[in-house]
Image (cartoon, rainbow, N blue to C red):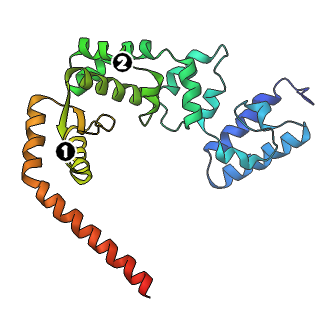
Amino acid sequence: MPGVTDPDLLVRARKLMGLYRGGVGGERGNAGRRLSALLREHDLTLFDLDPSLPVTQDVAALDRWRESAALLARLGTDAQDDALSVLVDADDLTDPEMCRLLEAVNLHRLAEVRVDGWAALDGLDPAALRQAAAAITPDDVLAAQGSLAARLRFAAARQLYFQTHPPRLIRTATPVHKAFVRALIETLTGHPALPPDPEGVRAHLSAPQLARVRALSATFLPEADRRAEQAAREYGEALARQERD
């Protein structure tokens, strides 16, 4: 590092950086000015203080600093294990950062550590949830939201649901019926239907869920048709007015 002659220099600079990040009012402003002067005097950049920061002497860049980014910079170093223990619960990672984290984490080992707690919280059988978690892939995790641990918990519960609810086909006659039934299923179960089927809607359902969806469909499909027809008519009228005006 250019200009570093005082062995305590980086320690002092990092303390000032900590005061700037955590301080308020005059204390924060004073720490920022002292840190900026120190960086210029010794030809240092923020990157020299923390590899997660940009190569700049502009202290304002600290306002965009994130702990998660700092921890990600430790992956591949001797401090990786400590960083991972925090990163798996970080909920502010971008998609590229999550992909990078996934490369460093053994998903199934993480699930093994957490699965008993998830099962207790969700009222699920631990052995069954553990078996379901063993089938999770990185793509399953990336399809969810939140921290890595939260995504993994969600993916494990969804995998268990799919394993314990057989795929069923509910036949539909029109696109409106298909959209109506799909919305019913996904809202009632909290799980997505399977990819589109030309004959209707295919989804993982228990026998009671299947019966419920069929009963709702039989009762309310006429109303769905009426609303779809009304929406189409109103849309046509609106377009015609635009053309007329």
Which residue has dot 1 on it? 172
Q: Earlier in the sequence, mark 1 or mark 2?
A: 2
- Camera-near label (1 vs 2) is 1
Q: Position of residue 164 (x, y in %)?
A: 20, 21
Left or right relative to 192: residue 227 = left
Pointer 1 local density, CA inside 10 Å: few below 14, some 14–19, many at least 20: some
Left or right relative to 47: residue 241 = left
Q: Who is closer to the viewer here, 243 or 50? A: 243
Residue 137 seen by the camera: yes
Tell me the amino acid under the disc marked 2: Arg
- Displayed quadrant of residue 228: bottom left
Q: Who is closer to the viewer here, 79 or 157? A: 157
Left or right relative to 167: residue 195 = right
Residue 12 seen by the camera: no
- Displayed quadrant of residue 120: top left
Q: Who is closer to the viewer here, 118 or 19? A: 118
Q: Residue at x 21, y 37 (%)?
A: 189
Q: Position of residue 137 (x, y in %)?
A: 44, 20
Query: How far apart are the two marked residues, 1 and 2, measured between alpha carbons?
Result: 41 Å
Left or right relative to 56: residue 22 = left
Which residue has dot 2 on it? 114
Would you place residue 74 above or below residue 39 in this image?
above
Question: How many numbered circles are shown?
Answer: 2
Tell me whether circle 1 and circle 2 mark residues in contact (CB < 8 Å). no
Tell me the amino acid under the disc marked 1: Thr
Q: Position of residue 142 (x, y in %)?
A: 47, 31
Q: Residue at x 72, y 46 (%)?
A: 61
Q: Secondary structure at mark 1?
A: loop
Q: Secondary structure at mark 2?
A: helix
Q: Residue at x 78, y 49 (%)?
A: 33
Q: Who is closer to the viewer here, 119 or 79? A: 119
- Displayed quadrant of residue 7: top right
